Amino acid sequence: MRVSEASAPGKVILFGEHAVVYGQPAIAAPVTQVRAWARVRDGDQAGVYISAPDLEEEYWLHESQEDDALAAAARLVQQAAGLAMLPPLHIRVQSDIPIASGLGSGAATAAALIRALAQHLGRPDLARDERVADLTYEVEKIHHGTPSGIDNTVVALEQPVYFVRREPQNLIEPFSVVRPLTLLVADTGVRSSTRDVVGDVRRRRQEAPSHFERLFAACGRIARDAHRALQAGEVADVGRLMNENQALLQAMTVSSPALERLVNAAVAAGALGAKLSGAGRGGNMIALVDGSCETAVRRALEQAGATRVLVTTLGLRS
């Protein structure tokens, strides 16, 4: 029996969330300590059976809803492969990435499924990083309505990425950092819908366009400065820019009391910088630390209510 497997990491937005939807640059990085996995094997009867134990779901592809993300990922691969129907298959997906927390759970799960299925169908061209990113973007539309394109790119390439959403093609620049940077990723334990928060920011922008354009432009300037600082190894500047970005996100109304508690606790404990990561109003925040403060910052985050604290090193591909 043939079996094909693939995985994809979680992700964090370092700079530029929300502004990226409106053409400003953003920077994101993989979080390799959490991953989604997909396993595809030959089925023993006609049809495609999808199993997602983490979601307590299992169903036949032909009985699934059109807006089911896992089914959509399978159908996209089928369409891209030019197949009238898929052969008998059993697809199983699992993930230890917290759902609705800004770590890219949906994108990672879709990317893992797409890559594993493409490999199983003997289509290495569809398993290439760029193709996986493109197909995952189509699935992201189900999750987020108008996704920026950054989540699917980072989880597929598994590298830090400088990203600008633009027509006819997004600017995607994977890059390396001169000095490894250690980030603590702390979960508020509060679930948040990216689709809902992005939609609310869109409504607020329509009500106060000049105000939000100034906020977005400032976020873009910070992302550009951070890109240079990351490549130059200027860690202190990266931390300062994180703090500036957080202030702008507060002004966009996408922070929350739970996020503020963690951000303030991290800075008070000596973090070089701290901000929310992702859509906001829940989910995760990130804190830039070094060896002198990592333990203290982790302890402060836990005492401030973080339900989980991950450590990731920016700039290393697993």
Image (cartoon, grey):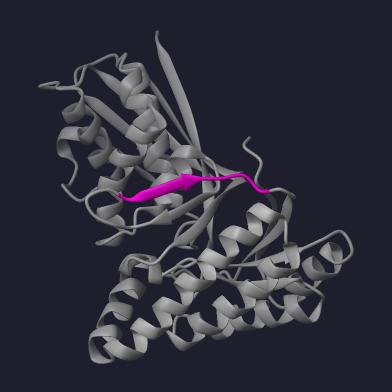
- Is 240 displayed left or right of 18 in the figure? right
Closer to the camera, 217 or 259? Answer: 217
Instruction: Identify the image quadrant of the N terminus.
Output: top left
Residue at x 75% of width, y 50% of height: 179
| Residue 239, picture quadrant | bottom right
- Is 308 displayed left or right of 125 in the figure? right
Is 224 above or below relative to 154? below
Residue that extends furthest to the left in the rendered view of this protein: 84
Residue at x 74% of width, y 75% of height: 266
**Could one spot residue 305 in this view of the protein?**
yes
Residue at x 19% of width, y 18% of height: 46
Instruction: Identify the image quadrant of the C terminus.
Output: top right
| Residue 2, picture quadrant | top left
Closer to the camera, 87 or 139? Answer: 139
* Picture coordinates of residue 186, whole percent (x, y): 65, 65
* Picture coordinates of residue 87, whole percent (x, y): 21, 17
- Is 97 displayed left or right of 50 in the figure? right
Is 11 above or below relative to 289? above
**Could one spot residue 280 in this view of the protein?**
no
* Picture coordinates of residue 16, whole percent (x, y): 47, 68
Q: Which residues are magenta?
A: 170-177
- Is 229 displayed left or right of 137 in the figure? right
Residue at x 30% of width, y 40% of height: 134
| Residue 111, picture quadrant | top left
Q: What is the count of numbered marks?
A: 0
Q: Does residue 208 belong to the magenta stretch?
A: no
* Picture coordinates of residue 114, whole percent (x, y): 34, 32
